[in-house]
Amino acid sequence: MRTLLLASTIALFAPAASAQTVFLDDATIVDAKGQRVTSDIIWADGAIVQEGANLTAPQGAETVSGAWVTPGLFAPMSTLGLTDLGSAGRGNDISAEDAPTSVSERAADSFNPRSPYIANTRGRGVTHAVVAPGTSSGSIFAGTGAVISLTGEFDSVLIEDAFVFLSLGEAGGARAGGSRAAAMAQLRAAISDAEGFFRRYNDAPDGGDALSRQDANALRSAVNGDIPMMIQADRASDLVAIIRLKDENPDLDIIVVGATEAWDVADELADADIRVIIDPLHNLPTSFEAVGARIDNVLFLEEAGVDYAIANLSSFRVVKPASLAQHAGNAVGEGLDWGTAFAAISSVPASWFGVESETVVVWDGDPLNATSAPIAVTIDGEVMSMDSRITALRDRYNPLNTDQRPHKYR
């Protein structure tokens, strides 16, 4: 029944691009900082025409009651557009196990805006995302990540060289040869290669201790602090090692991804001005580096004043950014302020990468409630299609479909 109601509500917004007017009665309006007010809205051509209390529905307008209107969501970690399957193979561009390159591999060069997961994820209110490559054998460095909009257009890569991504902890140790010490040694040597780039590589193409000329050149922007260095790590002792690394190299702009045991060193992370991407649902000891996992981890970061964003890292491959709002909602369930949680999946990560975009998402209920869904999405004034592979399959195999042809011919 809810699916049918949602489909009928979407139908109200479908003609919006052709001047259909919709009246949102008693809508909850959320700003970029998560602050909320209740108001009436007149919506036409994919934009808010008028907003105020006790408005009257224009003649001929369709009416929707109890909607929420918010900025678009920003997924601070994903592999969107790099593969359509989670398995290895020619269609998987997340990582290149046999490549001699590392830092210089750019996610933007593999990104496919026509991946079906782009529309699937946009249909859950996500309008922008970070796209990160994965680490490969022999190196802790995954490559250089991008920031995208989810328009599905070929010009949707907003920042091609947005950050450098690497792994420490168990994953980094395995990539570096078998230990955390090897991973940290590789990272320090790589930083030295980038810092002394012209001296080391001017007369000797293979003059680096850890990186080739090409990869050392790609790392320079992160070492100089021009773009963030995004480091995947979870164990508290690994986070302390990263804090020491920042103390040794104060120009580094570090974002830690994961930080399952960050609650144990939250004050130290705040003092070091290290930002964190955290998953509020990562609350079980899924590995030896996460034995201290706890569901209120995010509350410690909030209290300590750490600058953080919320992601769905417990399952962040490909399609999973679609559940971003649910993960923020779980943080609210543990006591985080609603507005703070919403900002952590919208304005906070957007500000990290300097992304400014006019986005509007109309929801049929509280966006942080797992049972709510978007009914309209706009990016920079353009009305986005709510159709996706998911909706196409739903419509094709819906038992109420009146098409009498066999499924394979529909």
Image: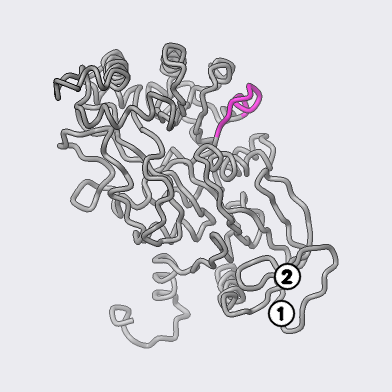
Identify the secondary structure beneath mark 1: loop
Predominant secondary structure in magenta?
helix
Res 42 label: 2
Q: Is residue 303 visible?
A: yes
Q: Write down the quadrant of residue 172 in the picture.
A: top left
Does residue 187 appear left or right of residue 258 in this picture? left
- 251 is higher (above) or lower (below) than 60: above
Residue 202 within the magenta-colored segment of the rendering: no
With 310 as the anchor, is 25 left or right in this view?
right
Q: Would residue 264 be visible to someone looking at this image?
A: no
| 6 relative position to 319: left or right | right
Q: Position of residue 50 (x, y in %)?
A: 75, 67
Q: Above or below — where is 132 with respect to 408? A: above
Q: What amino acid is found at the position of numbered circle 1 in the picture?
A: Ala
Q: Residue at x 68, y 58 (%)?
A: 68
For residue 194, side relative to residue 304 (left or right): left
Q: Position of residue 258 (x, y in %)?
A: 45, 30
Q: Nearer the viewer, residue 159 or 245?
A: 159
Q: Dot 1 corresponds to which residue?
A: 61
The amino acid type of the residue labelled 2 equals Ile
Q: Which residues are magenta?
A: 299-308
Q: Is residue 301 magenta?
A: yes
